[in-house]
Image (cartoon, rainbow, N blue to C red):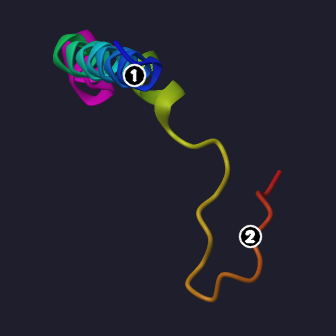
Amino acid sequence: MKFETLMLRGLFIACLAVCGLIFGAMLTTTPPATQFAASNRLGTILLAAPSSCALPPDGVVCPLPRG
C-alpha cells in the first residue's frame, strides 16, 4: 500500500471520529434555556441576566444609576 493512501485513510478515519464526537455532544447536551426553566429558581434567572444597563436607542452613553 502506498504511503499517500495510508495517510488519506487515516485522515478520513480521524475526521469521522471527530464528527461523531461532535454529533454525540450535540445530542447529549441540554440547552441553557431548558436548564433555567427546569430549575425554576429566581437566583439562577437573575445570575443569567446582564448586570450592565442596556444601551439607549442612540447607543452613545449608558445612564448612570442613581444612588
Tag 2 residue:
62
Q: Earlier in the sequence, mark 1 or mark 2?
A: 1
**What is the x, y in percent for residue 35?**
27, 17
Is disc 1 in contact with disc 2, using a CB cutoff of under 8 Å?
no
In the picture, measured across the screen, residue 57 lies left or right of residue 12, that is right
| 36 within the magenta span | yes
Q: Position of residue 9 (x, y in %)?
A: 31, 19
Numbered disc 1: secondary structure: helix
Tag 1: amino acid: Leu
Segment tinted magenta in the rendering:
30-41
- At 80% from the left and 63% from the top, the residue drawn is 64
**Residue at 22% across / 21% down in the picture?**
23
The residue shown at (67%, 50%) is 52
**Magenta span: chief secondary structure:** helix
Image coordinates for residue 30, horizontal then vertical, percent: 24, 17
Question: Can residue 51 be seen by looking at this rendering?
Answer: yes
